[in-house]
Image (tube, rainbow, N blue to C red):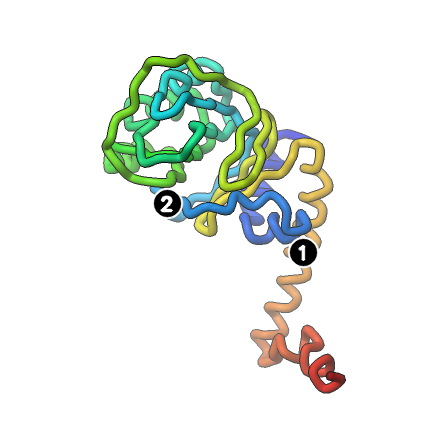
Amino acid sequence: MSGPGVYEQLAALGVATVYEAAGRRGLIDVDLEQLLPGTSVAGPARIAACAQDDNWAVHKVMPAVRPGEVLVLTMPEPRPVALVGDLLLTQARVAGAAGVLVDASTRDVADVRDLGLPVWTRWRRVRGAVKDTPGEIDVPVTVGGQRIEPGDVVLMDADGACVVPAARVAQVLEAALARQAREAAARARYADGEFSYDVNGLREREDRL
């Protein structure tokens, strides 16, 4: 299953619901700062694997970016070195990127926010990168303990980020929609004054201990 409708549904469902529905798999388990609050994105990963403290690969990946993709920018050891600023991110926005995940630093934050391109970053720091080693594009990388392969779906919102392997997208979307329906039903019961302690059977379980 693929296509904009799928990505839009995953973005609307959100990281927490998708992660739980996926069997608590795929969490990008690292603190990320959401530079454009209120945004939620999902799309296939377009990856730039940079050399250490070097952003040559970020320049190299820009011509390959396609509308709706999520740019994933990494280097071997995450450090507060700026892999992107407003000039590179302007290119990403014009190319139609849905969002950017930076496992390093982002700078020019005020200008980046003005661009309106959703960016999640490990750090805000102006320390510059070099351009000495070409790096690689569209290769598997690991971010926050999670392997991301080209084309895997990366989802990001106010809660952080997760990844769904391309082969599991249809299965996870179906499970996430079912989970959303169950949560809506539970939310209605709580709004009517019931308690999760009873709805989830925790009182009965404790009584049996």
Question: At x 60% / y 43%, what residue is drawn?
Answer: 26
Comparing 86 with 4, the one in front is 86
Inspect the image, locate mark 2, and give the three-letter code of the amino acid beneath it: Glu
In the picture, residue 56 is in which quadrant? Answer: top left
Q: Label for residue 179?
A: 1
Crowd around label 2: few <14 · some 14–19 · many ≥20 (10 Å)? some
Inspect the image, locate mark 1, and give the three-letter code of the amino acid beneath it: Arg
Residue 109 appears at what percent x and percent y? 26, 36
Residue 55 appears at what percent x and percent y? 36, 21
Q: Which quadrant: the C terminus? A: bottom right
Disc 2 secondary structure class: strand
What is the C-alpha distance between the residues marked 1 and 2?
27 Å
Q: How many marks are shown on the rendered structure? A: 2
Q: Label for residue 60?
A: none
Q: Which quadrant: the N terminus? A: top right
Q: Label for residue 33?
A: 2
